[in-house]
Image (cartoon, helix red, strand yellow):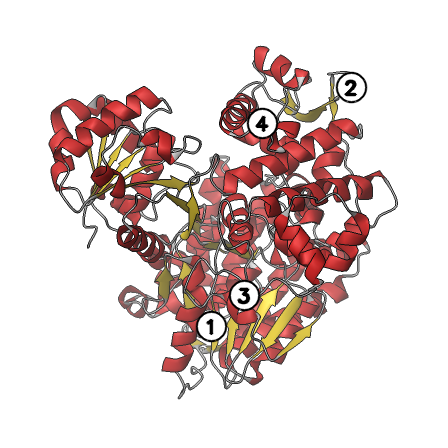
């Protein structure tokens, strides 16, 4: 079997997303809807989407627009037909009737439904047609969410299901979990239940919106949106419809009904147009009445909006035991929510899936949880869990654990895939060296470093780990959604507030030393980034010997946004790469001007394909569709480079004042056009001084150390300025840049 071309029917959010992702994998797609004009509009949305659905805009050429009436014959030749039309049974049944009349013998037909059971969708099909029909439930946005649920039943051709799983895993990069035909399938069944528990318990305990979200968020290993923020993000009206669908399909005995009851405030918000971020607001809203944007939250008792209050939980990292053992309302809330989630998830085994850790992986891949319910149970410990709860009668999974008294029950991670993932390999480590910012997993032939700070920001201890781990070939990789957001600016600002700039200088020098060490140590260093690799995080990537990059990477040197310049060798490394081009070899000013443009505008790439023209990646660097494959592909690189020799040091010939004058003219134009203000001009001039080589000319030769010194000098000048500190504080507080 092969999938050489696909037809996607329905060009709404999900249909467009599926078509875009297939095109990313270079699979020709025909996108059909009622009118060709509708699909053409969908193509425009795909092309201009933010965040981008395409790894490169040229991929849009893989999508052909058409309509159901005039172009339906394409179904005859398709290897896979994906239905993504409106969630109406009658519409879907009519469409299936048309598809199965003309589809070719070996093709697969699937629905992207998120709620309708397979048995309901296929009830009008023959047994033969049922064997070719399944549900492929993608999560939105399709490019970025790792989870794909394939829902099957006893009618399915198992070989076709296995093949589809393999294709979606290897070609589309999905974490594919096969689950049984039960309402809500797997991820949504538990994920939505968790949301409802978190909400109902918040109401019950009279917690504020901010309090609930501060607990049911990062401290619990759940995205920072929390429960009320996630409700707003999804859409309060859509969540109401999802709950109705669940309560309709689930048996009356299912505990889901206890948390899916109508909440008066929900219906009140919907009736007034407060449907979340897409409407006037929801549990949160932006109030612009004073001329300023003020974030407000809904008081759950008075139904009035007041300015959001910051809740300090004093737990920097996810620490479940610390959270549930607190002797306050936050600890009580955390335990109540977590224990109920564990009980519900465990009650679904083996009904939904035989492998309980499939549920964990579904929550990781589809909801971005750092731990699933069973990993939570493992962390809490069976003894502690059963000490605090006795309410699990009829829950076979928990009863078996209780009776067997087997503390280490979890077993192998990520059983849903045969790929040797990072999660699996970490379980086989020989020794772990650990500090507050990173872990070193030691194996016979290589080491792994995984950052563990918030946003994997770099500090002294994460750099210590990197240097320590280079005693063997090294892979820098992690399971979080970010490789590294850069150097820890909170750490830098703590010193800046005290006017302790010598400590900042010492810190940046240590970072430079670390980057230099990674590049020139005797053993090869591989970075395997996924998600964000920005600023200092990207400088680590730049100075690694090899890179295996996930397709959803966001990389770039963005320091100018906060009033700084790259100081970990980022300027130096990009200068070198651009100087090695034909244009750079013929014109000494070509590379400095190119890099000035890239760093000055804080340009980023949102895929390896976009990164290549910017020289962020080298042609020999590998790009990976499936995040799970980052580790095995990195390991292959190590195996290929057993006779590794460190690179030779770079030397530069820069024109100094000659090219700096050109840069200054560009800055003056931007300033006169009010594209940059006073501080932007100042930052630009410091960047120009570094990239021009400072007080040099073409007769002199500069070493890497000279460029490092120039970067450091400029960084220190800028960090001492109040306007830079204002930029940093504004970004740390709001997450948005300040133009000053």
Q: Earlier in the sequence, mark 2 or mark 4?
A: 4
Which residue is label 4 attached to? 252
Using the numbered discs, state the Cα–Cα distance from disc 3 to disc 4 in whole angstroms: 34 Å
**Dot 1 lies on which element?**
strand
**In this rendering, which labeled residue sits more in front, label 3 or label 4?**
4
**Dot 3 lies on which element?**
loop
In the rendered image, residue 34, in percent from the top left (x then y), is placed at: 23, 21
Residue 162 against residue 340 in the figure, above or below = below
Q: Earlier in the sequence, mark 1 or mark 4?
A: 4
Which residue is label 3 attached to? 412
Using the numbered discs, state the Cα–Cα distance from disc 1 to disc 2 in whole angstroms: 53 Å
- Mark 2 and 4 residues: CB-CB less than 8 Å, in contact? no
Q: Earlier in the sequence, mark 3 or mark 1?
A: 3
Q: Earlier in the sequence, mark 1 or mark 2?
A: 2
Which residue is label 2 attached to? 301
Depth check, front residue: 123 or 408: 123
Depth check, front residue: 731 or 150: 150
Question: What residue sits 18% from the left and 27% below the top?
Answer: 98
Quarter of the image where one finds residue 197: top right
Quarter of the image where one finds residue 7: top left
**In this rendering, which labeled residue sits more in front, label 2 or label 4?**
4
In the rendered image, residue 515, in percent from the top left (x then y), is placed at: 56, 72
Using the numbered discs, state the Cα–Cα distance from disc 3 to disc 2 in whole angstroms: 46 Å
């Amino acid at each position: 079997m092969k999938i050489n071309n696909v037809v996607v029917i329905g060009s709404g959010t999900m249909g467009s997303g599926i078509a875009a992702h297939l095109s990313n994998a270079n699979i020709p797609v025909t996108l059909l809807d009622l009118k060709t004009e509708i699909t053409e509009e969908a193509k425009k949305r795909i092309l201009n989407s933010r965040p981008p659905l395409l790894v490169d805009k040229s991929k849009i050429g893989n999508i052909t627009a058409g309509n159901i009436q005039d172009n339906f014959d394409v179904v005859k030749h398709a290897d896979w037909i994906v239905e993504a039309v409106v969630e109406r049974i009658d519409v879907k049944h009519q469409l299936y009737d048309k598809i199965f009349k003309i589809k070719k013998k070996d093709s697969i037909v699937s629905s992207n439904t998120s709620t309708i059971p397979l048995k309901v969708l296929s009830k009008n099909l023959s047994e033969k047609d049922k064997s070719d029909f399944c549900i492929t439930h993608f999560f939105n946005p399709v490019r970025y969410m790792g989870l794909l649920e394939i829902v099957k039943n006893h009618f399915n051709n198992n070989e076709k299901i296995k093949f589809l799983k393999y294709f979606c895993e290897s070609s589309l990069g999905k974490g594919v979990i096969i689950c049984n035909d039960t309402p809500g399938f797997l991820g949504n069944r538990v994920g939505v239940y968790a949301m409802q528990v978190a909400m109902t318990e918040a109401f019950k305990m009279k917690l504020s919106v901010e309090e609930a979200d501060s607990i049911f968020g990062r401290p619990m290993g759940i995205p920072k949106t929390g429960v009320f923020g996630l409700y707003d993000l999804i859409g309060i009206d859509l969540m109401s419809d999802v709950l109705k669908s669940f309560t309709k399909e689930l048996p009356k005995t299912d505990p889901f009904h206890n948390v899916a009851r109508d909440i008066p405030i929900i219906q009140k918000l919907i009736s007034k147009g407060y449907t979340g971020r897409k409407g006037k607001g929801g549990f949160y809203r932006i109030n612009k009445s004073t001329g300023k944007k003020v974030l407000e939250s809904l008081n759950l008792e008075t139904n009035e909006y007041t300015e959001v209050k910051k809740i300090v939980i004093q737990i920097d990292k996810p620490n479940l035991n610390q959270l549930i053992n607190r002797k306050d309302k936050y600890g009580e809330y955390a335990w109540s929510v977590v224990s109920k989630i564990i009980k519900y998830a465990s009650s679904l085994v083996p009904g939904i899936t035989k492998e309980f850790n499939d549920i964990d992986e579904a929550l990781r891949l589809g909801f971005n949880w750092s731990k699933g319910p069973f990993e939570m149970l493992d962390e809490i410990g069976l003894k502690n869990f059963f000490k605090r709860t006795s309410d699990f009668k009829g829950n076979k999974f928990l009863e078996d654990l209780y009776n067997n008294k087997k503390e280490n029950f979890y077993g192998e991670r990520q059983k849903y895939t045969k790929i040797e993932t990072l999660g699996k390999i970490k379980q086989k480590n020989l020794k772990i060296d650990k500090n507050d910012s990173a872990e070193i997993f030691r194996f016979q032939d290589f080491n792994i470093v995984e950052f563990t700070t918030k946003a994997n920001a770099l500090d002294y201890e994460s750099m210590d780990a990197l240097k320590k781990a280079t005693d063997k070939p090294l892979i820098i990789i992690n399971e979080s959604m970010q490789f590294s957001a850069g150097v820890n600016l909170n750490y830098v600002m703590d010193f800046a507030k005290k006017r302790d700039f010598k400590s900042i200088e010492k810190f940046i020098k240590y970072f430079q030393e670390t980057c230099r060490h990674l590049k020139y140590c005797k053993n090869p260093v591989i970075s395997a980034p996924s998600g964000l690799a920005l600023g200092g995080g990207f400088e680590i990537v730049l100075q690694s010997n090899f890179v295996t990059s996930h397709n959803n990477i966001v990389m770039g040197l963005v320091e100018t946004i906060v009033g700084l310049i790259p100081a970990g060798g980022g300027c130096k490394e990009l200068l070198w790469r651009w100087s090695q081009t034909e244009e750079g070899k013929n014109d000494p000013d070509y590379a400095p001007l190119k890099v000035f443009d890239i760093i000055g505008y804080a340009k980023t790439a949102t895929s390896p394909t976009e990164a290549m023209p910017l020289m962020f990646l080298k042609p020999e660097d590998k790009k990976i569709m499936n995040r799970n494959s980052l580790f095995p592909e990195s390991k292959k690189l190590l195996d290929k480079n057993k006779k590794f020799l460190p690179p030779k040091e770079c030397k530069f010939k820069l024109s100094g004042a000659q090219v700096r004058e050109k840069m200054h003219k560009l800055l003056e134009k931007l300033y006169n056009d009010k594209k940059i203000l006073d501080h932007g001009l100042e930052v630009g001039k410091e960047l120009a001084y570094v990239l021009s080589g400072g007080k040099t000319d073409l007769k002199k030769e500069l070493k890497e150390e000279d460029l490092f010194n120039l970067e450091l000098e400029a960084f220190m000048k800028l960090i001492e300025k109040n306007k830079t500190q204002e930029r940093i504080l504004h970004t740390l507080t709001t997450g948005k840049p300040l133009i000053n």
